[in-house]
Image (cartoon, helix red, strand yellow):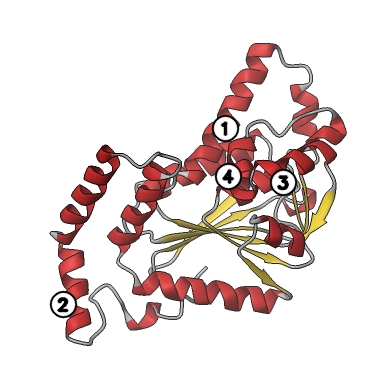
Amino acid sequence: MTNTTVILKQGDDGIAWVTLNRPEVHNAFDEMMIARLREIFYELEQDNHCRAVVLRGAGKSFSAGADLDWMKRAADFSHNQNLADAEYLAAMLNSLYSLNKLTIACVQGAAMGGGIGLVSCCDLVIADINTTFALSEVKIGLIPATISPYVLSAMGARNARRYFQTGEKFKGRRAYELGLVHELTTSEDEMAAQLNVMLGHVHTNGPLAMREAKRLIMDFAGQPLSSAIMADSAERIAAIRSRAEAKEGLKAFLEKRKAGWISRNNETGEDSA
């Protein structure tokens, strides 16, 4: 059976469009959606042509979190079955968080529970100001366990102490203040325009440099400054300076021209999906 719970579209411009495709349940995810997302993120990890990944939800909402029918089935699972189920979700989230591309979430309607987990795993989040957010797991006797490392990184422990335990709803402005959201918009057109601005930046950057810049963060964040870190960082800049991309970028800058990786059709970052 074809798994259409998530749709992947890729254009010639190196942008991948990943759309959660269960609008009838506000893109709540079940085991089928989790499996498809994990498959897609693995595929994009290996795709050197891909520069950035845009994650969005079909219909009114980004994602309402876990699907109720899926949770009903899980209620009858053994401990080992529940553990395997949770580990599979954790692996999917980590595959998004560590994906070697810029990841952008476009969020509208609602981002609840696991939906906030997906948001927190992305590098850049653009949200409609009227989006409703909630870490509502405690409302049904659960905890936001598998998403917690990413949400803690996004909003900080102090804020998480409140929202993990109250389960209260909050809107886009508050999500922006908490650090969950980078850019707020007030309409679909404004969101599309803001996304195009971000993708415009992507198209002017060296693809390898972007991947290696993200790897710096993945490897160095939270690490104490040490002689090993200093040596590693020096080795990385020395290595990338010798690559053809860096040589072309510097040469283009000095010659006051566009670098070879920039094409006329890619400068605006238009949606090719």
Q: How many angstroms separate mark 1 from mark 4 (CA)?
A: 15 Å
Label placed on residue 159: 3
Closer to us: 5 or 256: 256
Give the foreground label among 2 and 1.
2
Could you tell me the amino acid type at mark 3? Asn
Q: Upstream in the sequence, badge 1 or badge 4?
A: 1
Q: Which residue is drawn at 57% across and 53% down?
A: 7
Closer to us: 1 or 127: 127
Give the foreground label among 1 and 4.
4
Q: In terms of secondary structure, where does tag 3 sit?
A: helix
Residue 190 showing in the rendered view: yes
**Quarter holding residue 139:** top right
Label placed on residue 90: 1
Give the foreground label among 2 and 4.
4
Label placed on residue 153: 4
Could you tell me the amino acid type at mark 2? Lys
